[in-house]
Amino acid sequence: MASIEIDGVNGVIKSTVSDSDLTIKGNDGGSEISLLTFDMSDAGTAVFNHDIKLANDQKAIFGTASNLEIYADSINSYIKETGSSGNLQIIGNTVRLQSASDEIMLEATNDAGVDI
């Protein structure tokens, strides 16, 4: 069972059934779709049906200390580590920096070296 409540200050949407997902649905061209589901069997993990779009200069911020930011302005895009300690780590068997025209500018391959 789901309910909408006012707790005296805030509006609250609440499911009282254990592990019962909360889903926001809409109509796309005549078809009902699930826009956003909160997976309550996984501590409320948010599952979006499609992209998440932010306007220029709006940030996706990660971490309790807000130490990772991903954002774009009208010219450039940024991935920024903002903590006073720690590193921005990109992890993979092969890590590539690639141009918008698909040219590989840098490729680092596990146990095989780096090509620039």
Image (spheres, helix red, strand yellow):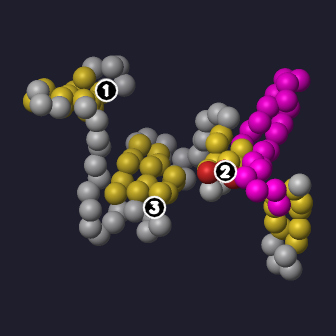
> Does the residue at mark 1 contact the one at mark 2 (Cβ under 8 Å)?
no
Residue 37 percent coordinates (x, y)? 71, 44
Write down the residue under mark 2.
41
Is residue 66 found left or right of 2 in the rendered image? left
> Does the residue at mark 1 contact the one at mark 3 (Cβ under 8 Å)?
no
User: Can residue 13 be seen from the camera position used here?
Assistant: no
Is residue 19 found left or right of 71 in the rendered image? right
Which residue corresponds to the image point at 65% horizontal and 40% vertical from the top-left? 48
Write down the residue under mark 1.
99
Q: Is residue 73 above or below residue 108?
A: below
Counting other residues with Cα less than 10 Å from the Cα at mark 2, is it few (<14), some (14-19), or many (20 or more)?
Answer: few
Q: Which tag, 1 or 2, sits closer to the chain's start? A: 2
Which residue corresponds to the image point at 36% horizontal and 25% vertical from the top-left? 100
Residue 33 placement: quadrant: top right
Q: Which tag, 3 or 2, sits closer to the chain's start? A: 2
The span shown in magenta is: 16-36
Q: CA distance from mark 3 to mark 2?
A: 22 Å
Q: Amino acid at mark 3?
A: Gly
Residue 22 percent coordinates (x, y)? 77, 49
Q: Amino acid at mark 1?
A: Ser
